[in-house]
Amino acid sequence: MHPLTRPSGTLSPAEGERDGVRGNSDRSKPTPEQLKDIFGGDDRILVFEDTNGDGKFDRRTVFLEHLNLVSGLEFGFGGVWIGAAPYLMFEPLQDGDAPKPVGDPQILLDGWNYNADTHETLNTFTWGPDGWLYGCHGVFCPSFVGKPGTPQKERQRMDAGVWRYHPTKRAFEVFAEGTSNPWGIDFDEYGQCLIEACVIPHLWHMIQGGRFERQGGQHFNINREETLAHESFHADPNQWFINPFIYDDIKTIGDHVHYAGSKGPHAGNGRSAAAGGGHAHAGMMVYLGESWPEQYRGKLFMNNIHGACINMDVPEREGSGYVGHHAPNFIDFNDQWSQVLNFLYDQNGSVYMIDWYDKNQCHHNNPEGHDHSNGRIFKIVYGDTKWTPVNLEKMSTPELLDCLVKPNQWYARHAQRILQERASRNEMTVSDMTLLRAFVSPGARAERPLETLRIANTNAESKLHLIWAMHVTQELHEQDILMLLRHGVHAPSRLWENGRDVTGPVRGASEFVRAWLVQLACENRKLAPEMLQQFAHVAREEKSPVVRLYLASALQRIPI
């Protein structure tokens, strides 16, 4: 446990000796004077490093200070991505061992609301399997997001839901709309987006383009095309952002709630310990590390704010998605001040948790009503799991490809991001590209990485990671997707080791691979007639509810 002041965000770079970067937020609204200057607030971004592997930080660095309302952080592409309403910003890092900013942050997007409710704005950043930066947003703090200078009518409405931002294309999208005030997001081994929520039921499987049950307010248009298409249907021009044609919405995947009684979520406050603690949650982790017992792999962990405990839900496949079942609490803190906001597992499978730690849990507009002297970081280690240093940034492309199939998803996620970064800087060699393309190119000879391709032959999750890696490095072309949809995913015709054929058995594409091929084909919203014909064929012949779900989702991105 480490004392810290108001930690509100966490991230983990691809260096094992660096514990992470923590936002240090007072969560007060920016004053007019502060809005004139990004550096007019009291928030800091701190770096804590464990340089000797004893499980405790021994070096603390102030990376940035005088920010305001820092609510989301992520690392990648040479810097730190910062959510601090009204801005989404990027701060490049200087080269060197000590984390130092290059200069002032770059403002990428503005218009994030902070006036209505300071704890419902942009939050909880994470990289998605498709190479986009994902985040959440709350229901009662309506934002109108755009690049600086964008006219109001051309901005994107954003309240409850999940958004994403592309790090190199500089594109912003609403991924899915609805729920309440999510403060936790993660992806399972099949790339399925899962979030928690408050007040309404707590567990949601977010589908691209989905419209989900809301705590309040109306469903909104999720892109510019939708807004223009509905423009003539609004009697009140001030409601131009509302979608008038949502007749029902998608419900929770949870078969339970974490509060007691039938009189609503707030009626169970303080009386819901047996049910899970209460209706308010923060943080979401799908545990895909390697050191915890197998019984925890794939389980969903979220903090219960009123219950001062870590809830655990068990996802079970059903139809095109999941049902979330209640399981015993993972941790009971027995301390009502405890307010864990987020979780991350590391290269050894141990888990970091940041704890806001305050008597006042939410809805407190007076910044002086909070205790600013506390804050904690926990690390949960199973048994005698040892800390091992690692630096993926120094690995070669074959080594990074090997990381894509490791059981601990920490390696796969960071390796994929680094491959994406290298491709964006044109640092991938012809040999690197050949290794990636060997996965889908019939007749290709691949001497390395044999273990990667052997595993991918028989493992659906590893196939997905290779498909995602091809996509983020711009090596998954339309003809590749057509071939894979028609013929299935195969390793190269022959794998060779010291001149010896070691190909082994090859299995076709899993339903999640086929589904993801549909989504990735629609990334730029432009499909060739041949792809549309293939989609029509898949719609007629496909038996998998997962693939059919992705086709239904894709309809919103296909020009008709």
Image (cartoon, rainbow, N blue to C red):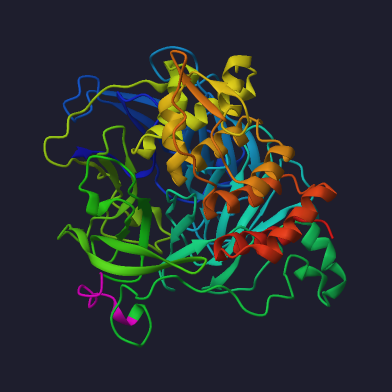
Residue 312 x/y as whole percent = 28, 61
Residue depicted at 23% across the width and 60% down the height: 309
Front in this rendered view, residue 84 or 290: 290
Front in this rendered view, residue 186 or 431: 431
Residue 540 appears in the figure: yes
Q: Is residue 394 above or below residue 127?
A: above
User: In which quadrant will I find the C terminus?
Assistant: bottom right
Residue 185 x/y as whole percent = 45, 53
Residue depicted at 21% across the width and 28% down the height: 387
Residue 22 appears in the figure: no
Q: Is residue 202 above or below residue 14?
A: below
Front in this rendered view, residue 157 or 28: 157
Residue 268 x/y as whole percent = 29, 79
Residue 320 x/y as whole percent = 52, 66
**What are the residue bounds of the magenta stretch?**
267-276
- Report how many numbered discs are placed on residues in the image: 0
Q: Is residue 415 magenta?
A: no
